[in-house]
Image: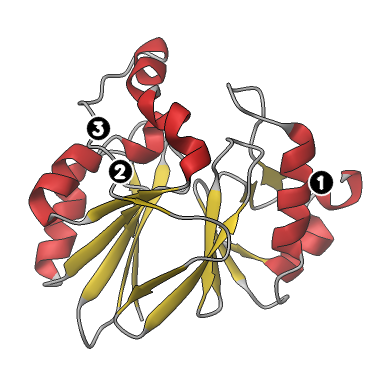
C-alpha cells in the first residue's frame, strides 16, 4: 500500500494519500489546505484519485477540495449527518479568519458499515460522531484514519456546533475496541496505536 502523509495549512492538518501501488487508484483523506502540494504528490506518483474523503467537514479538513475536485474529477465523500457542517464550512473559516473557496457538492454519502474500495484496498466506514455529527473513520489494512475523533493522548473537542461529548465517548471506545495493533492515523499530530492509547490516553480512564 502506498501511503503518504502531508501536514497542510495553518492548523497543521494531516492529509493522507492512500493508493494501491498496482492499479494506482487512490483516496485523498482530509485535503484541508495547500492543494498544490497535494496535487504535485498525486502527479509525481502518477496516481488516479477515485475519492476525496472527508472524515468531517470543518474547514481545515476540506479547504483544498475545490482544487482537488477540479484537478482529479474524484468523488467527494462524506457522511449525510455532516451535510450541515459541510455547507457552513466557509462561514466557519471566515469566523476563524481564514478564507476557502465554495465547496463542490458531495458526490457520495456513506454510512456506518459501508466499504470504500480502491484497487485491492478495502476500508470500512465507521460512523464516529462526537467531534462533529457525521464524523467518520476509515478502517482497514491494519490502519484507522480517525480524523479528529482521537489523537495521540487526547480526543477531539466537542464545543463546536454539532459536538456531543456523550457521542464522542462512544466513538472513542469504539476505536479502542479495534485490534490492539491497529495503527491510528489522526487528523492532527503524530500516529499512534490502539494498544498505546488504551494505556496512555487520559480519556481511556475518564470515559
Look at mark 3 in the image and give the residue it sits on.
Answer: 103
Judged left or right of residue 60, residue 186 is right
Q: CA distance from mark 1 to mark 3?
A: 34 Å
- What residue is rendered at 74% in x and 40% in y? 167
* Residue 40 in sight in this render: yes
Q: Residue furthest right?
A: 205
**How far is disc 1 from disc 2 in space, using C-alphas?**
33 Å
Above or below for 127 versus 62:
below
**Residue 43 lies in what quarter of the image?**
bottom left
Numbered disc 2: secondary structure: loop
Pointers 2 and 3 in contact (CB under 8 A)? no
Circle number at residue 106: 2
Instruction: Name the element at disc 1.
Output: helix
Quarter holding the N terminus is bottom left
* Residue named by callout 1: 203
Seen in the image, is 158 located left or right of residue 185? right
Residue shown at 39% from the left, 80% from the top: 121
Q: Please name the residue shown 79% across and 37% down the image.
A: 166
Amino acid at each position: 500500500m502506498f501511503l503518504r502523509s502531508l501536514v497542510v495549512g495553518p492548523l497543521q492538518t494531516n492529509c493522507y494519500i492512500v493508493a494501491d501501488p498496482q492499479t494506482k487508484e487512490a483516496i485523498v483523506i482530509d485535503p484541508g489546505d495547500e492543494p498544490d502540494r497535494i496535487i504535485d504528490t498525486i502527479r509525481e506518483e502518477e496516481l488516479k484519485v477515485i475519492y476525496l474523503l472527508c472524515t468531517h467537514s470543518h474547514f481545515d479538513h476540506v479547504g483544498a477540495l475545490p482544487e482537488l475536485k477540479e484537478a482529479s474529477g474524484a468523488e467527494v465523500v462524506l457522511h449525510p449527518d455532516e451535510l450541515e457542517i459541510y455547507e457552513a464550512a466557509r462561514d466557519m473559516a471566515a469566523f476563524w479568519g481564514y478564507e476557502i473557496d465554495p465547496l463542490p457538492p458531495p458526490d457520495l454519502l456513506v454510512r456506518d458499515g459501508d466499504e470504500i474500495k480502491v484497487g485491492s484496498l478495502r476500508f470500512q466506514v465507521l460512523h464516529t460522531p462526537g467531534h462533529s455529527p457525521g464524523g467518520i473513520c476509515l478502517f482497514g489494512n491494519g490502519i484507522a484514519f480517525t480524523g479528529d475523533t482521537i489523537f495521540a493522548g487526547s480526543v477531539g473537542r466537542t464545543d463546536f456546533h454539532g459536538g456531543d461529548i456523550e457521542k464522542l465517548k462512544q466513538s472513542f471506545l469504539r476505536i479502542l475496541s479495534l485490534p490492539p495493533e491497529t495503527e491510528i492515523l489522526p487528523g492532527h499530530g503524530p500516529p499512534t496505536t490502539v494498544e498505546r492509547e488504551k494505556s496512555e490516553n487520559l480519556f481511556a480512564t475518564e470515559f
